Image: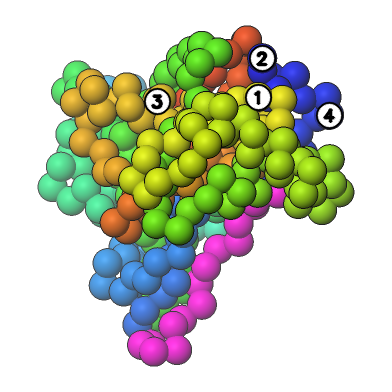
Amino acid sequence: MNLFANRPEAAPVNTTLSTARFNTPSPARPDTLLTMTGDRLSVASERTLVKVAKQDALVYQAKAGDTFWGLARRFAATTSADGNPTLTEINAYAKDLQAANGGKATIRVGQSLKLPTTENATWKLPALVAAQKQLGKQASDFDWAQADAKWGYAETIDVRVPSLKGKAAQDFAVREYGPTKGGSLYQVEALKAPEAPREIMLNAQESLTLTAKPGETYWGIARRFAATMSPDGSPSATEINAYVKDLQTANGKFLKAGQKVTLPRTENATWKLEALAAAQKDVEMRQQAGEKLPAFDWAKAEVAWGYAEAMEVTVSPMLGGTPERLAVHATGRDTYSVQSLADYYRLNGLAE
């Protein structure tokens, strides 16, 4: 049985994908900003952010065949619908490049070229400059002429810079926090390559398992996990009692503190159990593979419909800490794709 895979109505588009920039100063400290980490607000000092001043430019070593025209064609601002700058736009930025690099019309191989962030430059340049400044001395290992940037999740700019030494490309998430004295502030976070989705298969007996706490009852558990037809999402007494019977059948008539409780995926159970069971098995398999993960409180796990029929599972560690956020997608009967929610967004191009 797979209630999850056969949900009759289409899942709504996730309206939480559009998140405004947070550049509001904290009232406690004038140099402190509210920042986004994943989907959570945290506090960051201006000292942890990269400052890009108006005179800052992207710098790289010129290669054979480089011309101001070629660079301008890549980095000029444009209003063209297809994203390709016009001859006029290219010429405008080519003049800025020449002015920033000695006013000469030619480029020498090995010359340190500056790509200034003028009004004729692409919006991508400030993010590229911030990423280059964050790398510091290591920046020379990467090919900034081939770097690219695109809008990412929650107002970030995803920057990718190819390596010059045959290593993996460097990925960054760059977020702007607004102006400061003499320039603008950016948070630059180095990113790992998105993890591929993991396939999870559940058999009919594999259910969500949780540990009963003192004072917990079958009624209380059933009230949270019973299926319901109520418009407000709150199961009726009849619906709760129906799932209580399923819980007793699976676990015995009485419930004791510390007991491992199986939450069977019956017709009386919420459709959320499909995603929770898949997520729990995914965590168990990762732990068996040697990944260090905390003990999670599955009784309090949250599930919401996400983008394109994916389920968004949030489960917090028992002892506190960063919640695990997973995207669970039914791909077949009792077969699920599970991966980090942030990576699911990135791999599927979910952006504002």
The residue that label 4 is drawn on is: 9
Crowd class of label 4 (few under 14; some 14 to 19; many from 20; radius 10 Å): few
- Which residue position holds label 3? 282
Asked whether the residues under the numbered discs 2 and 1 touch, taking CB atoms below 8 Å apart as contact, a structural biologist would say: yes
Residue 295 found in image quarter: top left
Earlier in the chain: of badge 4 and badge 2, it is 2
Q: Nearer the viewer, residue 20 or 322?
A: 322
Q: Label 3's element?
A: helix
x, y percentage for residue 272? 62, 35
Tag 3: residue type?
Asp
Q: How is the image coloured?
A: rainbow
Magenta stretch encompasses residue 29? yes
Mark 2 vs 1, N-terminal side: 2
Q: Residue furthest left?
A: 137
The vertical placement of 23 against 63, above or below, is below
Q: CA distance from mark 3 to mark 2?
A: 19 Å
Please tell me whether mark 1 sits on a helix, a strand or a loop.
loop
